[in-house]
Image (tube, grey):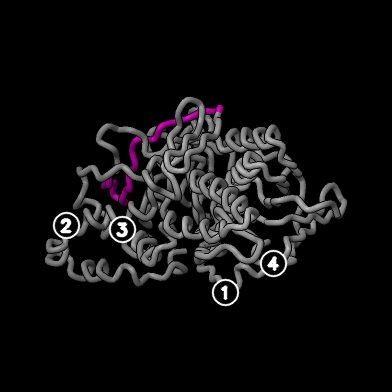
Amino acid sequence: MHMPCDLAIVGAGPAGLMTARTAAGLGLKTVLLEKRTDVGRLTRACCEQLIMDRHFQGDTVRLEGGAVVSLENGFRVPYQGPALDVVHKYFVSPAGSRIHFAHPDRSPIVIKIDKGALLGGLWDECARAGVDLRSGAHVHGARDTGAGVELSVTRSGRQERIAARRLIIADGVNSRLAGRMGITSGRSCMATALCVIYFLEGAESFQPDTLYTYFGRAYCGLAPITINAGRQPGQTSLVVIGNKANPPEKLFRAITTEGALAPKLKRARIAGRLGCAARACMPLRTPAQGNVLVIGDAAAYVEVEMQGALACGFQAARAVAAELAGRAGFEDYMRWWQRSFEFNGDDWMQVAQGFALVPAYGDDELDYLFGLVEGEVLEGTYNQYRSPRLMWGAILRHSERIRAELPALHEKIMNRTQVALSDML
């Protein structure tokens, strides 16, 4: 085993790559370990977008001058790839009533980008900065020695041991290394969603500048369906969420042949697909233990989105530099983490439950509720926590009418936060 490096990072997603680039810029001897051999080729489902909400997932970002620009953390990440502004978001009921989200000036709610191009560019930047990049590296375990961390790695059929003064775990939503080190002991996972994004050619009546989410059993009996622009011009992406009992492939067949969207999809053909299994777990509010820090999706309730991952990497590298200088860098990181991500708040579960329109509400109920606010334009936001607040705020302005016309529905709405997350999936 060679002399220890300053920092070892496991995972070359946006969080791990941003950690490596920032750490190298701070003068830290850095090793980045990634099991894939080509970080620019996506193998798992991802929305591939930058979210324009302010103060969301640790940052406010913009796409300017060929770079992702952080307005709160102060970094720039070069990006040379396609970009598509999405300016409208609609929640659609079974009968077609719509709740509309948009900015008054029709500035983008999200910008669709090529995540592979972003990651490939960051990988090249890390190489130029002197990061020791090791692709095809499988990390089997790690041990905190007190003075640092030792990692067991297989690469090109050979066993390696790597010593580092600090370790960043950034291996994604289904992280295993943190569990092997005991950092996630006691963390509960409430549900596992199986997600497939189908990239379709020939789908009808979907606008590329619009994000549609369809609620109701008429579309899918298990979960909402999301449709927006695909990875290539002229493509449409259809996001199907299932579980073991109702796999996405089975749901897709029903959606495209029997559901209310089938007429719009009858001429569509599958040009590609990406899938993943995503666990919804309690967030790690204190993701540091000894010489190890868990960041990004690996510590989150499901995910931190791309800008959140970049922000986590930037802050994590600074935390390691502070630790190695004798300061409490991990403590500083955890304070930033806790205040920057909404799922670390006490009401995060109530907000998530309040979004559970399917299967909690029948199709007639959804048509009635969405119809109450059709024609209004709510604040342009993608934020998964703010969106249900805005939606229910608009609906409950009609609370007395609902109570008078449909008292049982009114009572259900008042008790909406009692739905268990596992019941949604």
- Whole-percent x, y for residue 103 in the image: 28, 37
**Upstream in the sequence, badge 3 or badge 2?**
3
Residue pointed to by mark 4: 180
Q: Amino acid at mark 1?
A: Gly
* Residue depth check, mark 1 versus mark 3: number of the one nearer the observer: 1
**Magenta-tinted stretch:** 80-100
Query: Relative to 67, is 70 above or below?
Result: below
Residue pointed to by mark 2: 397
**Upstream in the sequence, badge 1 or badge 3?**
1
Q: Is residue 265 visible?
A: no
* Pointers 1 and 3 in contact (C-beta within 8 Å): no
306 or 106: nearer the viewer = 306
In the displayed structure image, the side of residue 224 where residue 180 appears, left or right:
right
Compute the Cα span from label 4 to label 2: 49 Å
Q: Amino acid at mark 4?
A: Arg
* Residue depth check, mark 4 versus mark 2: number of the one nearer the observer: 4
Secondary element under disc 1, as helix, strand or loop, is loop
Query: Relative to 25, is 175 above or below?
Result: below
Secondary element under disc 2, as helix, strand or loop, is loop
* Pointers 4 and 3 in contact (C-beta within 8 Å): no
Which residue is pictured at 44% across the width and 45% down the height?
A: 59
Magenta region includes residue 266: no
Residue pointed to by mark 3: 363
Secondary element under disc 3, as helix, strand or loop, is helix
